[in-house]
Amino acid sequence: MKHWNARLKIGAIIVLFFLILGFIVPFFRPHEDVMAWSVYGKNLKPSWEHPLGTTSMGQDVFWLLACSIQNSLIIGICTAAIATVVGVAVGLFSGLKGGWADRVCTLIMDSLIAIPSLPILILLGSILKGRTPWVLISLVLALFSWPWPARQTRAMALSMRENDFISTAIFSGESTRKIISREIFPFVSDWSAANFVNTILSAIGSESGLALIGMSNNSTATLGTMIYWANSRQALLAERYWWILPPVIAVVLLFVGLFILLSGYQTYHAHRRGK
């Protein structure tokens, strides 16, 4: 860790802070359902008892924020994991095999890329009357996210397929799975990590935007639903900044932290390779 650059250290600290706040702190919450109404006094300003005050529905903003960060990160990580694994696997297979398999995979990729995901999510939210479960949101986001890494890794596989060590592996009878996992994937693993982080950012942003227009499940605590309820209850006009600012600041800091972490990691890895 002593060889990490400043950006990598700062990004890691920010992301670690959110991981602790989202996945450890909620275990100590006094009430199981942070979305329950009238548990505390309404519109209480920040105090020792309520560090971030309470909402107009009698919810503690601090515990609501902690659980919202947890759920938003789960959505982002699940979406990114599915999209990255599927995209990288399909892209490498398509680029290495070529022929009809490559044409079929490319057709599917291009078709999904051409379809905008936001109208599909809005339509889904309308059908489910604003009760779309986060699992379904993650699956839909992953469905429209995996073609992008697939296209990139396909291009990498196509360029690497002409290398001598790949030709040697093919002619020696090594299976496609082993060639992909042993010969090609190590060269795209760093790019896959970068795509994983970018997809987390995209998924959290998409879910937040969906929640803000009331098309997500607003009974589940996420950063997007926190902003939705604060906005619908006129928190900004009533100058209840302790309610609306925490989720907005959390989204900004989370995005900045992940971006700095990714940028620092890329610089660190490039420096290590240059040695």
Image (tube, helix red, strand yellow):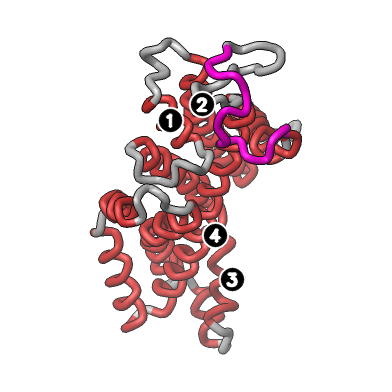
The percent coordinates of residue 244 (x first, y second) are 46, 21
Q: Give the range drawn in magenta.
A: 29-44
At label 2, which amino acid type do we have? Met
256 and 60: which one is in front? Answer: 60
Q: Name the residue under label 1.
A: 229
Which residue is rendered at x = 42% and y = 67% of the image? Answer: 91
Circle 2 sits on which residue?
57
Q: Name the residue under label 4.
A: 187
Q: Is residue 37 magenta?
A: yes
In this view, 215 is above or below 154? above
The N terminus, quarter of image: top right
Q: Which of marks 4 and 3 is in front?
A: 3
Residue 130 lies, in percent from the top left, at 37, 47
Please indicate whether residue 95 sits to the left or right of residue 45 in the image: left
Amino acid type of the residue tagged 1 in the rendering:
Trp
Q: Residues within 10 Å of mark 4 (few under 14, many from 20)?
A: few
Q: In which quarter of the image is residue 54?
A: top right
Task: Check disc 3 and report the residue beneath it.
Answer: 181
Task: Report how far apart the C-alphas of labels 1 and 2 lie in the structure.
Answer: 10 Å
* Residue that lies at the very extreme toward the front in this rendered image: 38
Closer to the N terminus: mark 4 or mark 3?
3
